[in-house]
Image (tube, grey):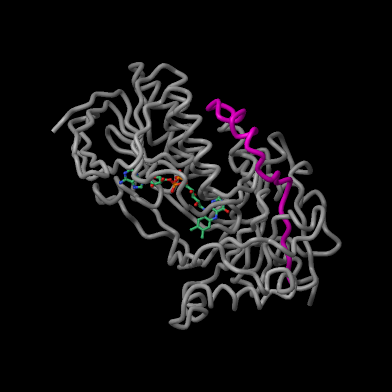
């Protein structure tokens, strides 16, 4: 078996792995990425939030992304029957980016990975991690190429950015059930032939079908649109009724009074994918010689599009700490990595839970809208969940519940 020697091995070339490997390369670290598939490949997660722009910028990946021409996302619209709530990222509380993109991930991730290669990172596609052995912080990872050939990669540190592959959580028995109740989704892309001119046609929207069930509509600049239905697993299973996913997604679209006309008769561009019980968690975000980032660590829920922001936040932070460790600094991974990341996870967990209880929906659709409250919630939806100047971050565990109770009292 052949051997390779690197400073850092990154598993997976999704957004998390691209951000960390690009940052490490920029800092002259000998980094290698192994990616199981060949890009472009299909993956879900098409609505970005502004916080990701900070990370792509710092990793030096933004200029390349700009040239592709993805659809700009300036905010998000939530619909409930005739009620409408629009968040505009430029109105948010505090500092930060006020726009991002909505993207077909196959193209987006392909562009990211190509740019990482352009920057000189050794990125090997169709190479799958099948085993790993640690000796202190040093490790030997066994990878298998598409021809079945195995080799060993010796590294001083491993960043596991394998997303739903969850390589180290599986190999090291780190899997843990999510705190969130089981939800599932079905999604596909369509040729958006009935798209309206102007903002209406390109606006990213979330249409509430029932309190816990919502439809996503994510228009892309290539003329296609992503459609997905999300709900409790029991609900999605019933929608499927042992029939195919296309039947279920068509049925879901027919439940949207707002979108039935635009999407009632469209053909799916691929057999809709069913993602069952998608939330996941881990016992620890790090160990001696490795860190878990992005979906290889924790995935909550798609409702506020937090997945990619956590993927890039954790990818960037893991890379920075790894660099310092390689420079012989002692790193407190619990305090500097896990505690920090989990603070943001906790904030979003509250918002997601309060979305599904209906409390957050009360706040979103309350009339007249309180613009100050909206601005502070908007900053959370933009991904600035570590800004403790924002009371809607700092007091996340009480503020939504309390305000929703006041609204309910007012209605009585
Ligand atoms: P990925 O993008 O999954 O990349 C991981 C890579 O690792 C893959 O390319 C994979 O091939 C590779 N890999 C796996 N196993 C191995 C192995 N053994 N060896 C080598 N390589 C391997 N997030 C958002 O921000 N916005 C959204 O709108 C959104 N919608 C979602 C909807 C649903 C229904 C779900 C379930 C999730 C959604 N997400 C969304 C979450 C989003 O998909 C993820 O958070 C994001 O893709 C995580 O990026 P990543 O880089 O961690 O992993």
Residue extent of the magenta highlight: 57-80
Residue 172 as seen in the image, left or right of residue 270: left
Q: Nearer the viewer, residue 84 or 390?
A: 84
Please tell me which residue is depicted at 47% across the width and 72% down the height of the picture: 233
Q: Name the one closer to the observer, 390 or 66.
A: 66
The residue positioned 60% from the left and 30% from the top of the image is: 62
Q: Residue at x 84, y 64 (%)?
A: 367
Residue 71 belongs to magenta span: yes
Quarter of the picture containing the C terminus is: bottom right
Near-viewer residue (96 or 271):
271
Q: Position of residue 334 (x, y in %)?
A: 38, 36
Up/down of 251 relative to 230, above or below? below
Quadrant containing the N terminus in the rendered view:
top left
| Residue 255 position in % (x across, y down) | 66, 77
Is 49 magenta? The answer is no
User: Which residue is depicted at the point 40% across and 21% down?
Assistant: 324
**x, y percent for residue 405:** 70, 67
Q: Residue 147's image quarter?
A: top left
């Amino acid at each position: 078996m052949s051997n390779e020697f690197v400073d850092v091995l990154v598993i997976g070339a999704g957004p998390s792995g691209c951000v960390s490997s690009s940052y490490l390369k920029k800092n002259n670290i000998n980094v290698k990425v192994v990616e199981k598939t060949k890009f472009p490949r299909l993956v879900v997660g098409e609505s970005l939030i502004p916080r990701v722009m900070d990370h792509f910028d710092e990793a030096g990946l933004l200029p390349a992304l700009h040239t592709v021409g993805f659809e700009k996302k300036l905010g998000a619209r939530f619909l409930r029957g005739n009620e409408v709530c629009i968040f505009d990222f430029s109105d948010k509380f505090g500092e930060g980016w006020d726009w991002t993109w909505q993207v077909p991930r196959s193209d987006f991730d392909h562009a990211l990975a190509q740019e990482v290669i352009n920057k000189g990172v050794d990125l090997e596609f169709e190479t799958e991690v099948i085993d790993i052995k640690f000796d202190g912080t040093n490790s030997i990872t066994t990878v298998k190429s598409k021809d079945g050939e195995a080799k060993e990669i010796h590294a001083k540190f491993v960043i596991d950015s394998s997303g739903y592959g969850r390589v180290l959580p599986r190999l090291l028995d780190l899997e843990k059930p999510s705190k969130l109740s089981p939800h599932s989704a079905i999604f596909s892309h369509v040729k958006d032939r009935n798209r309206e001119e102007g903002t209406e046609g390109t606006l990213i929207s979330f249409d509430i079908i029932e309190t816990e069930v919502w439809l996503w509509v994510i228009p892309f600049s290539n003329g296609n649109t992503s459609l997905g239905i999300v709900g409790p697993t029991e609900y999605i299973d019933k929608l499927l009724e042992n029939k195919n996913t296309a039947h279920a997604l068509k049925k879901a679209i027919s439940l949207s009074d707002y979108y039935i006309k635009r999407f009632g008769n469209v053909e799916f561009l691929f057999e809709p994918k069913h993602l069952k019980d998608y939330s996941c968690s881990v016992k620890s975000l790090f160990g001696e010689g490795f860190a878990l980032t992005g979906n290889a660590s924790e995935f909550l829920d798609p409702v506020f599009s937090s997945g990619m922001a956590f993927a890039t936040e954790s990818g960037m932070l893991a890379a920075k700490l790894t660099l310092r460790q390689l420079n012989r600094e002692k790193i407190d991974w619990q305090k500097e990595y896990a505690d920090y990341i989990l603070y943001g996870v906790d904030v979003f967990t509250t918002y997601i839970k309060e979305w599904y209880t209906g409390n957050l929906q009360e706040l979103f659709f309350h009339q007249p809208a309180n613009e100050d409250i909206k601005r502070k919630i908007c900053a959370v939806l933009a991904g600035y969940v570590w800004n403790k100047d924002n009371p809607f971050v700092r007091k996340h565990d009480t503020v939504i519940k309390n305000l929703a109770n006041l609204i309910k009292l007012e209605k009585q």
